[in-house]
Amino acid sequence: MSVATVERAALDSSLAEVTPTVTAPRYAAFEPVQLGRWRFVHAANGMFIEARSPALYARLQISPALGAPYGEIEPAVHLLGGRVGSDIADAIAERALQWSATEWAGVVVYDHDAQRYRLIEPQVRSRSGTHITYERVDRDPRFTTVVDVHTHGYGRARFSPQDDDSDTDGFYIAVVLGGCQSRASLQWSARIAIYGRYVPIQWLPWEDWSCSDS
């Protein structure tokens, strides 16, 4: 076996270790992914992506069933602190309207010391009506990011290629607001970002949703 072949095999082994794919058990109980990890799960009813942080767990279907002879699993999302409070949603909307002509960003973290959610406005490096860049807030060990939210000013509430590029280094619920002229015109879109993979969701973290796991 050549040196190049051995090196390629080692790279494949490293890739499989960082992003493993497992099969859903048909007869035994399903064991969730370990804390701080993510993986693909091949089940009889489709391919799923699963991730777990200290404050958020998600198991979401990303492709239809392929007829595999494995067990079935169901989508699930669980937030350690439960549903995010409506007061935080109101504060986000207010800030979006205050900064309506430019983009604004906020991060909802779970404060493990206080055992509650907090809305933090990160330090902004630059902003305009079409972009915003800001410092990360989860370097503080007390905090786990649960929701990363930003606005598109008067634009539409949809994720841009620039948003795709920025949502590659974490696991959280991403929310974008558009139509920030007034409360009546506000639009919201959401997805779960898992280290560069994105799964659209039809609910917001301060709403009741059916995709939950108690």
Image (cartoon, rainbow, N blue to C red):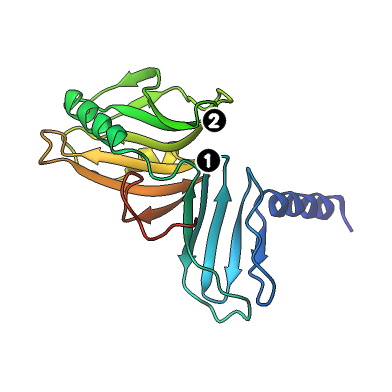
**Number of callouts in the render?**
2
Q: CA distance from mark 2 to mark 1?
A: 9 Å
Q: Which mark is residue 112?
A: 2
Q: Which residue is nearer to you in this view: 28 or 182? A: 28
Amino acid on which the number 2 mark rests in the picture: His
Q: Which x, y percent locates residue 105?
A: 33, 28
State the mark number for residue 55: 1
Residue 175's disc number: none
| Disc 2 residue crowd, few under 14, some 14–19, many 20+, Cα 10 Å | some
The amino acid pointed to by label 1 is Ala
N-term mark: 2 or 1: 1
Residue 147: horizontal and vertical position, in percent? 41, 38
The residue at the point 56 percent across, 55 percent down is 50
Residue at horizontal 72%, vertical 51%? 17
Q: Position of residue 159 (x, y in %)?
A: 32, 44
> What residue is drawn where x is 20% and y is 44%?
187
Q: Position of residue 67 (x, y in %)?
A: 56, 82
Q: Is residue 166 left or right of residue 176?
A: right
Secondary element under disc 2, as helix, strand or loop, is loop
Neighbours of disc 1 within 10 Å: few (<14), some (14-19), many (20+): many
